[in-house]
Amino acid sequence: MKTEKVSELTTNRLSIYLRCLNELAASGAETVSSQAMADQFNLNSAQIRKDLAYFGEFGVRGVGYYVEDLSRHLRKILGLTERRRVAIVGLGNLGTALANYQGFDYDSFEIVALFDDDPAKIGRKTRSGLEIQSDQNIGEVIRSECIEIVIIAVPATAAERVLEEVTEAGVRAVLNFAPIHLNPRPGVKVNNVDLTILLESLSYFLANPSDEAVNVHHREFLRHDASANGAGG
Amino acid sequence: MKTEKVSELTTNRLSIYLRCLNELAASGAETVSSQAMADQFNLNSAQIRKDLAYFGEFGVRGVGYYVEDLSRHLRKILGLTERRRVAIVGLGNLGTALANYQGFDYDSFEIVALFDDDPAKIGRKTRSGLEIQSDQNIGEVIRSECIEIVIIAVPATAAERVLEEVTEAGVRAVLNFAPIHLNPRPGVKVNNVDLTILLESLSYFLANPSDEAVNVHHREFLRHDASANGAGG
DNA sequence: AATTGTGAATTCCTTCACAGCC
DNA sequence: GGCTGTGAAGGAATTCACAATT
């Protein structure tokens, strides 16, 4: 186990490995080798071993990794053993979709508050029964509800101010869907999903034919991109 | 102007520069220096100059870049001078939100078809008046409507098959929101938005306090992922 | 004087290759 | 024999620093 700083490229891959392990566990596999995982994602087995080695020695030589055991370790490393309270700001199309999205792991992420500035929306409830609140109260509610993660789904023009407010209230983790570069203060992390960049990247690809498309794809996936995605701030 | 292969990290940044130039143009600025742009996004001015230099010599020494001129070049490079026809597959919460999303540049991206496999949804129209079609016809419609980009917003279990079908129909650019790793065939590009990875990355950050948060943030944003990115696949 | 364009240096990330262990 | 963990090598992306240009 090393103490040097771990790259976000590495930690993002941990999520991918965890997903893989979940599937393996569901299919009844007891152990898995780094090579087997690497094959699934078209990446290098040494990279998987190295990624894991930043956090400990989880494998057994000659055997591989015990699926359940490694899964438990990764969940711990990723902080998924605690449930994080999440708020969504901006209940337009995207915000509403996210509020109703069934794909989150509700053991790890619980949406507990919704904010909007449109009086017509305030007081409405989403399918899950959660009520949309006035964004006048953001700071107060974030504190009282112990919200740790905020999803920004407001227009670009409002995003900066929202970030400012939630940061002021102590939030240190933000997922931003507004197509704008946000400058968080030190100690605050913003992950960006920038649909404009993602689409323009496809446009570039279509406009500039290349014969190495697959390799490009794989590299970018496994680095993210964070990209997340996409885009980041 | 070089002929070597351009990294996707570079081309994604072009989108960011273009957005910056749009704002500058709106504010009436005639020229801009790489340093001025770099300041806005907390990145290195040499990187901007180098990114641009892959595609030509757009600047004037001692002056900087002419905003309108560089903007035009970037739009051309990114293929935004042509309008791409887009389809969305899967009209759940997310797909519907995307179908109604107002943030796209409609000069460059036009949503022209919606597909779902739920008989209850087929025939319904979105706010924009576009009708949801049966996904039985995906291939046929993609060809007849000349669709170049497909947005996958179906559950993870269905994503692989959708990719297969649209690829078979000739689509080479895909934006995937399903939380699964897709293996596109050569010549097909898939950009991924993996909300699971993006959230888990925030969870990791919260679980592992570090004092270098801001730097990490900036680096990841400007590289993306990815992420798209967030996440990629 | 200011700013670009770029070779060189640096930093970061990935892959190789093998010793060590089961 | 098979597989992990990792030092060393290789490759890629960023940043430095300066010559070239207006």
Image: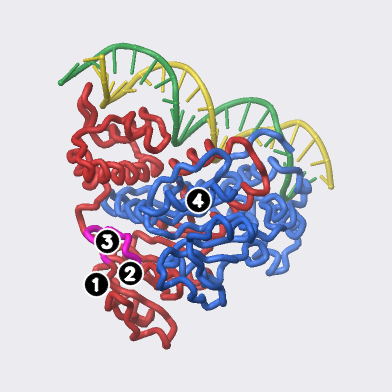
Chain colours: A blue, B red, C yellow, D green
Q: What residue type is labelled 2?
A: Ala
Chain on which label 4 sits: A
Q: Residue at x 27, y 48 (%)?
A: B78
Q: Kindly identify the residue that appears in the image at 38 percent across and 61 percent down.
A: B174
Q: Do the residues labelled 4 and 3 touch (CB within 8 Å)?
A: no
Chain of residue at mark 3: B
Crowding near pointer 2: few (<14 within 10 Å), some, many (20+)? many
Residue occupying image coordinates x 43% and y 66%: A94
Discs 2 and 3 carry the same chain letter: yes
In the picture shown, does residue A105 fall above or below B221?
below
Tell me the mark number nearer the camera, choosing from 4 and 3. 4
Residue position for label 4: A165
Above or below, A28 against B223 in this view is below
Q: Are marks 2 and 1 in contact (CB under 8 Å)?
A: yes
Q: Helix, strand or loop at disc 1?
A: loop
What stretch of residues is rendered in magenta?
B100-110
Mark 4 neighbour density, 10 Å: few (under 14) some (14–19) many (20 or more): some
Residue closest to the far bottom: B120
Cα distance between the residues tagged 2 and 3: 10 Å
| Residue underneath mark 1 | B145
Badge 3 element: strand
First of labels 2, 3 by sequence position: 2
Q: Is residue A154 left or right of residue A56?
A: left
The residue beneath circle 2 is: B87
Instruction: Give the distance between the C-alpha atoms of the residues marked 1 and 4, in whole angstroms.
Output: 45 Å
The answer for how far apart the CA atoms under marks 2 and 4 are is: 37 Å
